[in-house]
Amino acid sequence: MFELDHDLAQDIVDRAMAILPFNVNVMDSQGLILGSGEPERINTRHEGAQLVLANGRVVEIDAQTAKHLKGVQPGINLPLLLDQRLIGVLGLTGEPELLRTYAELVRMTAEMLVGQRHQQAEQQWRRQRCDDLVALLLSDTGDSPRLIDEAQQLGLKPQLSRIPYLFELDKGQSAEALSAWLQSRYPDSWCVTPATGSLLWCRSATAVLDDLRLLEKLEGQGWKVLRVATGDQAEALKGLRRGYRRVADLLAYGRDVVPHTCLLALNRYRLPVMLWRYRNDDAVEELLGPLHKVVAKDSNGQLITTLRSWCEHDGQSQPCADALGIHRNSLRYRMERIAELSGVDPLSLNGMLALYLGVQLLAQN
């Protein structure tokens, strides 16, 4: 329920007294003076206001009547209404006959200011509640019918298909500002700030979006995005929660393994990311064992670079050689050297798969 406060009351007083040559008081629903042109009267009771509150009508007090009331000077006291609800009293000090015309104009202005502040408070509450609801819906307990019903009532559209994006921002960048920018330009977006410098954005899957263009646009707006991980389209809340976990893993993988890559797509790194979650497991260490043997003898990084290119070109010799700028014979020699050092044949399906997975887990300098 909206109530007057000191700041709003004093704002009304200051605006009115900047135009009128009369003192103005604003009282709350208990008759306590919250704002006044006479600071010493703030936080004191106003009996004239209490008469207005008791009767719900304008109360005029002349000099003779004021002598019999505590904390009251001659003037006019008018009820302040918000949506037909009495929330306070506006008082102008002076002879009532001189104040009547001004009093109604000041009351109209005051009620407009109250209405604007109430609308702002409602909007702020709605934004905060929507943020809280989205965070709850993305948690493990987010399938509560009550939460889903409230989300629908607030227009969050929990039934929409969405695609998760997890942004990692440079130091000093505001995730809240980026959230507001994204939500203002992409309807039905959800945004959550899981940690400092991090923003989870769940955009509607109906929107067509070029991720590279988005990053360029963000850079043009002044945001420094270190990296962003993009996931799969999710048709339901359960899938969106799973997608959030996947992009979180993908972002962490990108930070440790491919730190110079800004745009990380789950489709591109799905398999290595799945393994990376178990990077401390003995089985993964065994997978990396053959590559560590290659790295130990690869002082200039030529063999690992060759192996990365081999994997990127799906084991096709000519495209790989062209990308490296070498002859196919040189490529064959390097692959034979890799096989010799690692003890794994990169030309066999099992060997190529083992080396591919291993090289995806090696950090790039």
Image (cartoon, helix red, strand yellow):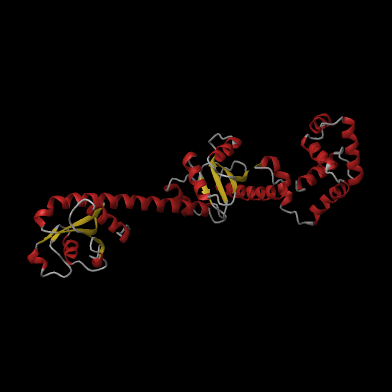
Farthest residue to the left: give it: 64
Query: Which of the pair 250/73 is nearer the observer?
Result: 73
Residue 74 to residue 203: above or below: below
The image shows residue 115 at horizontal and vertical percentages of 29, 50
Left or right side of 93 for 354: right
The image shows residue 124 at horizontal and vertical percentages of 40, 52
Farthest residue to the right: give it: 340
Query: Which of the pair 302/253 is nearer the observer?
Result: 302
Left or right side of 292 for 111: left
Residue 316 to residue 45: above or below: above
> Is any part of residue 84 visible from this angle?
no
Picture quadrant of residue 46: bottom left
Left or right side of 98 for 340: right
Residue 320 to residue 283: above or below: above
Query: Which of the pair 182/316 is nearer the observer?
Result: 182
The image shows residue 263 at horizontal and vertical percentages of 64, 41
The image shows residue 164 at horizontal and vertical percentages of 58, 44
In the rendered picture of this protein, how many numbered marks are placed on residues? 0
Left or right side of 212 for 76: left
Quarter of the image with the N terminus is bottom left
> Is any part of residue 65 visible from this angle?
yes
User: What residue is drawn where x is 57% and y is 37%?
Assistant: 214
